[in-house]
Amino acid sequence: MKEKIQNWFYELINGHSRLLKEEVDIICETRFDEDYKWMNDYQIQRLIQIRIKEMYKKKFHKTK
């Protein structure tokens, strides 16, 4: 019970831990991918934003 409450407070303050890890995975994969070395920093940031939005659309496809 104590662990459940701790997890609830953590998610309330920091967001869902699993989704955060998935976002970090997307960021790292994109940043270190050799195919995107030609892009500047702004372009990579935009690509990461698009990939994260797509991840959320796939995960929560029934929400608007």
Image (cartoon, rainbow, N blue to C red):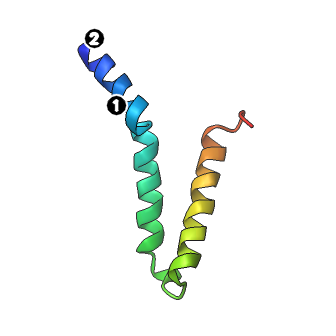
Question: Residue 38, position in %: x, y?
Answer: 53, 88
Question: Residue 34, position in %: x, y?
Answer: 45, 81
Foreground label between 1 and 2: 1
Q: Earlier in the sequence, mark 1 or mark 2?
A: 2
Q: Residue at x 47, y 59 (%)?
A: 26
Crowding at mark 2 (Cα within 10 Å: few <14, some 14-19, many 20+): few
Q: Quadrant of the C terminus?
A: top right
Instruction: Find the residue positioned furthest to the left.
Output: 2
Could you tell me which secondary element the residue under label 2 belongs to? loop
**What kind of residue is marked 1?**
Tyr
Question: Residue 23, position in %: x, y?
Answer: 47, 53
Q: Are marks 1 and 2 in contact (CB under 8 Å)?
A: no
Position of 1 with respect to 13 (left or right) is: left
Above or below for 53 versus 1: below
Instruction: Find the residue positioned furthest to the right.
Output: 64
Could you tell me which secondary element the residue under label 1 belongs to? helix
Above or below for 38 versus 47: below
Circle count: 2
Q: Which of 7/26 is in front?
A: 7
Residue 24 - label: none
Q: Quadrant of the N terminus?
A: top left
Position of 54 with respect to 11 (left or right) is: right
Residue 1 - label: 2
Position of 1 with respect to 62 (left or right) is: left
**What kind of residue is marked 2?**
Met
Q: Which residue is mark 1?
A: 10
Image quadrant where residue 57 sits? top right
Question: Residue 24, position in %: x, y?
Answer: 41, 56
Q: Distance of mark 1 from mark 2, alpha carbons? A: 14 Å
Above or below for 43 versus 64: below
Crowding at mark 1 (Cα within 10 Å: few <14, some 14-19, many 20+): few
